[in-house]
């Protein structure tokens, strides 16, 4: 069995496909079996004549050569040789018999006829050139032999002729039957192989269909993801547009009091809100307070001047939490949106802190009849950070301006005081000079008086 397996698998490699492996094994097996069937013809040819011995021997070698061709991985040539060797060998053998004066032997002709199926067994329709060539090579000698078939009916069985004996006819007939059985078996094997191949193709087609369905699903998923991405990109562009609008309002050097109404109006219109307010965090001597600084669509007379302490109400609570508060279940009477149709409770309420260096500088409150998505919240957070920095800078600038004004006022006061002191010093100097003059005059008068007194006393003594 080991020898048979080695013969069947001659030339087969591990990387061969199933069809290729079947071609190798089928051609090796058929060549080996037919080579065995050639042995009786070799023996009978040797017994009859050395010339007749040559042709079945060459046919035997041709079949053995098929195995060696497969061993050299030339399977197409091997199958071509396998398809034509039997017909050529049998036909030449029969021709030599006829040249030697032997009558037409029907049994040999049947063997040759049975071998005509070989090209169709071992060559596929895709191998068109080899298949046509093999059929032409096989059919020519058969048609030539047909011209001698009438001698079969004219010959008699007189004389002892080994090739006309019943034994030879019986052997040839049996061999023909075996060849037909082998051919039928090969055809059956090929049909099953083709069936398996078709099953594999169907399985592969089903797999491809599943892959196509999967790819279609993947494509639908990809398209859906692409739509989501495009929607996200549009939202990002929308947010960038809003940030750009806010940044154009927050010009360096401007004060919050000058732009707060425009800023609040721009944010409300961009988000599609209905009303809103901005609260500033102010530090006073009596403590910290959160005061309403700007409002949109509120009753100004009712709400202006509103102030909260840290922790008081939502405004005071968000100051402590330092985060965004978003409500979609707004309590009744908590806040009302005023329109021409009356007062209505908003569907959503959002509050965000405006921070700078982790310090809350202001708070924005927006009320709307619509709910906000994540992009709107992100926009509000980013805009709040910008406004927080702007408020901090604005407060610093305002504080710097006040300090500068105070410094200027103090400088003016000092200048005025210096002028007063200078004037006072001048007046004091003048006074001191006047006093010195008066002193000197008084001293001179005293001297004069003393001189007069002395003169008077001297005059009295003389008298």
Image: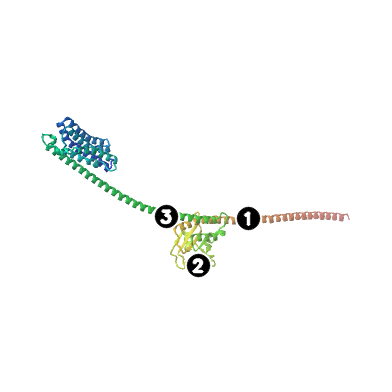
* Residue 190 in picture, x, y percent from top left: 24, 44
* Residue 32 in picture, x, y percent from top left: 20, 37
Residue at which label 1 appears: 408
Q: Secondary structure at mark 1?
A: helix
Instruction: Report the front residue among 416 and 366.
Output: 366
Is 190 on the left-hand or right-hand side of 315?
left
Is 142 on the left-hand or right-hand side of 446?
left
Q: Secondary structure at mark 2?
A: strand
Residue at which label 3 appears: 227
Q: Secondary structure at mark 3?
A: helix
Instruction: Look at discs 3 and 2 and give the one toward the viewer.
Output: 3
Which residue of the protein is positioned furthest toward the top in this rendering? 50
Mark toward the start of the polypeptide (3 vs 2): 3
Q: Is residue 219 in view from this perspective?
A: yes
- Estimate how packed mark 1 is, as few (under 14), some (14 to 19) or many (20 or more) residues with alpha carbons within 10 Å: few
Residue at which label 2 appears: 338
Which residue of the protein is positioned furthest toward the front in this rendering? 154
- Give the numbered dot on residue 120: none
Instruction: Report the front residue among 134 and 71.
Output: 134
Mark toward the start of the polypeptide (1 vs 2): 2
- Estimate how packed mark 3 is, as few (under 14), some (14 to 19) or many (20 or more) residues with alpha carbons within 10 Å: few
* Residue 19 in picture, x, y percent from top left: 27, 43
């Amino acid at each position: 069995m080991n020898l048979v397996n080695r013969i069947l698998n001659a030339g087969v490699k591990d990387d061969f496909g199933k069809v290729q492996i079947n071609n190798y094994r089928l051609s090796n097996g058929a060549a080996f079996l037919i080579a065995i069937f050639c042995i009786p013809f070799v023996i009978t040819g040797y017994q009859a004549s050395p010339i007749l011995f040559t042709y079945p021997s060459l046919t035997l070698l041709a079949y053995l050569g098929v195995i060696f061709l497969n061993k050299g991985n030339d399977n197409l040539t091997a199958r071509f040789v396998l398809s034509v060797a039997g017909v050529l060998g049998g036909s030449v053998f029969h021709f030599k018999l006829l040249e030697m004066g032997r009558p037409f032997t029907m049994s040999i002709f049947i063997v040759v006829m049975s071998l005509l199926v070989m090209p169709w067994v071992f060559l596929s329709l895709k191998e068109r050139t080899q298949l046509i060539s093999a059929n032409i090579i096989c059919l020519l000698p058969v048609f030539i032999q047909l011209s001698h078939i009438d001698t079969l009916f004219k010959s008699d069985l007189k004389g002892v002729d080994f090739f006309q004996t019943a034994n030879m006819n019986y052997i040839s007939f049996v061999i023909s039957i075996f060849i037909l059985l082998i051919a039928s078996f090969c055809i059956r094997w090929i049909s099953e192989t083709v069936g398996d191949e078709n099953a594999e193709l169907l399985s592969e087609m089903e797999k491809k269909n599943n892959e196509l369905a999967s790819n279609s699903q993947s494509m639908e998923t990809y398209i859906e993801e692409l739509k989501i991405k495009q929607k996200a990109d549009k939202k990002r562009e929308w947010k960038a547009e809003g940030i750009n609008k806010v940044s154009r309002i927050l010009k360096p050097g401007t004060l919050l009091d000058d732009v707060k109404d425009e800023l609040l109006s721009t944010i409300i219109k961009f988000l599609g809100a209905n009303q809103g307010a901005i609260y500033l965090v102010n530090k006073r001597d009596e403590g910290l307070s959160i005061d309403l600084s700007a409002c949109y669509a509120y009753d100004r007379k009712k709400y202006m001047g509103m102030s909260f302490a840290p922790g008081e109400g939502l405004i005071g609570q968000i100051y402590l939490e330092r985060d965004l508060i978003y409500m979609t279940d707004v309590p009744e009477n908590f806040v009302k949106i005023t329109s021409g149709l009356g007062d209505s409770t908003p569907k959503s309420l959002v509050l965000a802190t405006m921070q700078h260096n982790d310090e809350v500088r202001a708070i924005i409150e927006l009320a709307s009849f619509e709910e906000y998505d994540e992009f709107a919240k992100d926009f509000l957070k980013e805009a709040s950070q910008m406004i927080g920095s702007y408020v901090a800078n604005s407060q610093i600038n305002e504080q710097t301006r006040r300090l500068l004004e105070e410094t200027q006022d103090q400088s003016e006061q000092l200048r005025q005081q210096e002028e007063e002191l200078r004037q006072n010093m001048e007046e004091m100097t003048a006074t001191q000079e006047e006093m010195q003059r008066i002193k000197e005059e008084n001293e001179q008068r005293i001297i004069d008086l003393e001189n007069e007194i002395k003169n008077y006393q001297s005059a009295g003594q003389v008298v």
